């Protein structure tokens, strides 16, 4: 690891942000600090992660949602001070790293399968019960 990567890792540790593990296809709720004049409030932005960019301190991700029948995308910097929290609502089962094809789709064709946690096999469950 070179000097710059070491400094970035120290800076990430110093920030102390708790970023959950998420990947493209997951539905997330990003709580963003919004300043309107003198007031400061938290705005929730819920949507599907269509892209993730892992670059240490410069990491970012793009979230897409449908608002009033119109597709809206927003790119967030992962370690930005404007992000109050990130919550994973649903895990998506996709086979691509970038889901840009969802931009051309709408309705049922834009749905993403849910990734289910693997279940114990019946033999393992029986031995665990005993």
Image: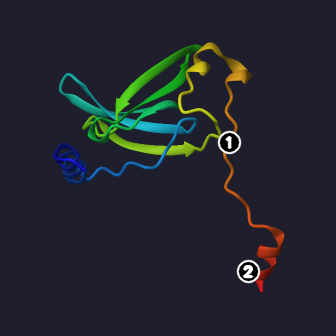
Above/below status of 61 relative to 126: above
Left/right placement of residue 3 relative to residue 44 reads left
Disc ID at residue 114: 1
Rendered-image quadrant of the C terminus: bottom right
Q: Nearer the viewer, residue 70 or 128?
A: 128
Instruction: Give the residue at x 45% y 34%.
Output: 52
Q: Position of residue 117 (x, y in %)?
A: 67, 55
Residue toward you, 49 or 90: 49
Q: Position of residue 65 (x, y in %)?
A: 53, 24
Q: Residue at x 67, y 33 (%)?
A: 112
From the viewer's perspective, tell me whether residue 41 is left or right of residue 118.
left
Q: Secondary structure at mark 1?
A: loop
Instruction: In this rendered view, identify the residue nearer to me: 129 or 7.
Output: 7
Seen at 54% across and 16% down, the residue is 71
- Can you tell which quarter of the image residue 95 is in? top right
- Residue 41: assigned label: none
Location of residue 120 by image quarter:
bottom right
Exactly how many numbered labels are in the figure? 2
- Which residue is label 2 attached to? 128
Name which quarter of the figure residue 76 lies in: top left
Sequence-wise first label, 2 or 1: 1
Q: Mark 1 and mark 2 in contact (Cβ < 8 Å)?
A: no
Q: How is the image coloured?
A: rainbow
Q: Secondary structure at mark 2?
A: helix
Between marks 2 and 1, how big is the CA–CA gap?
27 Å
């Amino acid at each position: 690891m070179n000097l710059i990567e070491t400094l970035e890792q120290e800076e990430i540790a110093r920030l102390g942000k708790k970023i959950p593990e998420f990947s493209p296809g997951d539905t997330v709720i990003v709580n963003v600090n919004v300043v309107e004049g003198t007031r400061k409030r938290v705005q929730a932005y819920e949507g599907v992660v269509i892209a993730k960019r892992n670059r240490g301190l410069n990491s970012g991700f793009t979230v897409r949602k449908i608002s009033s029948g119109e597709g809206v995308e927003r790119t967030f910097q992962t370690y930005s001070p404007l992000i109050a929290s990130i919550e994973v609502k649903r895990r998506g089962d996709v086979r691509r790293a970038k889901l840009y094809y969802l931009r051309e789709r709408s309705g049922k064709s834009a749905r993403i399968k849910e990734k289910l946690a693997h279940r114990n096999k019946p033999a393992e469950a029986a031995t665990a019960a005993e």
